[in-house]
Image (spheres, rainbow, N blue to C red):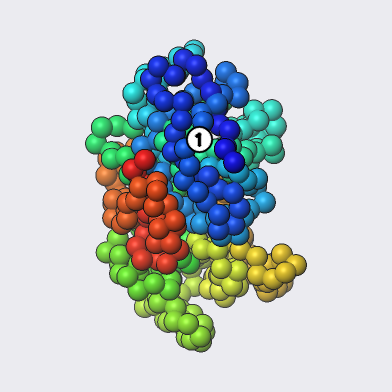
Amino acid sequence: MVLILFDCTCFYNKIDKFMNAAVFYGPNNIKVENVNIKKRNNNECLLKVLSCSVCSYDIRTFRNGHFKVTPPIILGHEICAQIVDGFYEKDINIKSGTRVSIYPVIPCLICWYCKNKKYNLCTNLKEIGSSINGGFAEYILIPKTIFKIGGIVSILDNITNEEASLIEPLACCINSVNQIKNFEFGSVIILGDGPIGLMQLMLIKRSFKVNVTVIGKISHRLGLARKLGADLTILLEIDDNIDNYIERYKKYLKEVGEEFSPNVIFVSNNNPSSLNLAIKLVNKNGKIVLFSGIKNQNNENKMLTNIDPNFIHYNQVSIFGSFSSTPNDMSEAMKIINFKEINLRSLITHEFSLFKIKDAFDTSESYKGFKSIINKF
């Protein structure tokens, strides 16, 4: 079976009509194939993919499928690419050869959220790597809509392709940290020691003078968290009593004089039990930010949580969601990387060719490092 992509005759003198692409056909079924580039309409621009980072969403989709994904399709949405043909419209001038990071949300531009530039909350949301073909391929066609909303961010020379592919997840972290901008708090807990948790750690340390605790399950990741500024790290051992860790954290808060101040809890992993843990850790007037999509825990597709509404009420606890990002977050992420305000390079631990994409997934899934990047096509 050949996956039909796009066609654009003006490109044929510049590239072959075929490209290598990792085609997702269903759970645990992905194949690197030579596929034809066919166009669907004239509202798309061709880009050459330079690097595409592996997201935990890609891995979950590869293993189990996803309600947003209809195979066959090309996954991958954390993309650094190069413009093949320039894009020129009113107030937009992006030349051929420009390296860019790509905002993966395709908005409808009609709903209330789009009219108010909250594109990540579009009621008719489509996404690169979910609704249309993504970045695990030599080339990608991007809807011109993304150009028009400022979703194509030019990359400066001192940013590597690999770093540029992390602009999208960093923008998502910026969106999550923005949820607490006008909130008074004394400490932060990040539940998750993966790339997202550590990006949030660096952003919080950059913007706030607060103590940050990172709680996770991988010792070498917590080691890097300490190097990146975590004031306390807690390693969760399998089958250990969770109350012991809660007591350790509360003892630490008492030592630093923040025992009774409001705190912020970021749930930055997909384990359903993490929300229950967050409820146990949050202080009065505290705030819980749900960053990650939570995996289903039973056959009825229900998340098992134990939230007492009276606890929320009497302690004035708030629970907020944070999904994706906006083009403004993408631009801010690019500036942060450009000025080396955070050490993003420390999170890039493995690089793979497209033909080794299953190895990239396995490496990410096994927690051997942090970010795996596809950068050879």
Q: Residue at x 46, y 46 (%)?
A: 32
Q: Is residue 357 left or right of residue 266?
A: left
- Compared to residue 297, the image places residue 206 above or below, namely above
Q: Vertical placement of 127 versus 288: above or below?
A: above
Residue positioned 44% across, 56% down in the render: 358
Where 350 sits versus 43, above or below?
Answer: below
> Which quadrant is the N terminus positioned in?
top right
Residue at the right extreme, as displayed: 300
Residue 242 seen in render: yes
Q: Is residue 189 above or below residue 333?
A: below
Residue extending farthest to the left is: 158
Q: Residue 235 placed where, x, y %?
A: 40, 77
Where, quadrant-wise, is the C terminus in this rendering?
top left
- Residue 259, image x and y in percent? 45, 74
In the rendered view, does 1 fall on the left or right side of 191? right
Is disc 1 surrounded by few (<14), some (14 to 19) or many (20+) residues within 10 Å? many
Relative image position of residue 18 (x, y in whole percent)? 46, 30
What count of labels does the image hold? 1
Left or right, residue 115 beside residue 364: right
Q: Can residue 327 be seen at all in this image of the molecule?
A: no
Tell me which amino acid carries mark 1: Val
Residue drawn at (47%, 82%) of the image:
238
- The residue wearing badge 1 is 35
Residue 360 drawn at (x, y percent): 40, 56
Q: Which residue is depicted at the point 48% across and 86% down?
A: 240
Q: Secondary structure at mark 1?
A: strand
Quick one: 335 or 167, which is closer to the camera?
167
Looking at the picture, tell me which residue is in the foreground, 295 or 187: 295
Q: Nearer the viewer, residue 326 or 76?
A: 76
